[in-house]
Amino acid sequence: MTTPQELKDLFTRGLEQLADGRIEEWIDGFTEDGVLEFPYPAWGLPTRMQGREALLAQMTMFRDQLKVEFSEPEFYTATEDGLVVAGFTGECTLIATGGQYHQVYLSVVRYEHGRIAHFRDFWNPWSVMEAAGGELAWKRILPTMARG
């Protein structure tokens, strides 16, 4: 069993891995069929990815197209049965345009045996689209981003 403090440490380490571009290490923290879900994605981005291949495809684009510095997470809960709810912010730069923006995140994560089974990430898609130059500009650069 993973303790609430261990879960908080795993979550915090995951944010560090993402900010450092260590995507493969972050994905290694998922169960084999782990899910990453964005209930409110920016236009053209998937809402749900499952399994290592899908996670790697999406999150490699994240690393290649976005520079981010995350704040320390504020934990709303971390339970013995593996639930973590945390809020944090990001100071972000969209590489395609150089646009900078502030993002507020709320993550609801379910861990199983110390690995992420389901990661639901809530964030404001309009912030990134504005940094791209607006919705129309976002739609123009999205295919370029997907090619990496």
Image (cartoon, rainbow, N blue to C red):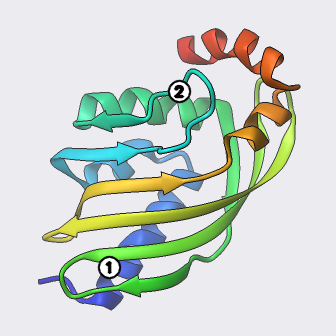
Classify the position of the C terminus by image quarter: top right
Q: Residue at x 61, y 52 (%)?
A: 123
For this rendering, which residue is in front, 66 or 74? 74
> Residue 58: x percent and y percent?
44, 30
Residue 45: mark: 2
Q: In the figure, is residue 138 to the left or right of 143?
A: right
Residue 51, above or below 27 = above
The residue carrying pointer 2 sits among few (fewer than 14), some (14 to 19) or many (20 or more) residues within 10 Å by Cα, namely few
Mark 2 vs mark 1: give the one in front.
2
Q: Residue at x 47, y 44 (%)?
A: 38
Name the amino acid type tagged 2: Leu
Residue at the spot of label 1: 7
For marks 2 and 1 on the same chain, the one whose residue lies earlier in the sequence:
1
For this rendering, which residue is in front, 133 or 114? 133
Q: Residue at x 84, y 35 (%)?
A: 131
For this rendering, which residue is in front, 131 or 11? 131
For this rendering, which residue is in front, 43 or 1? 43
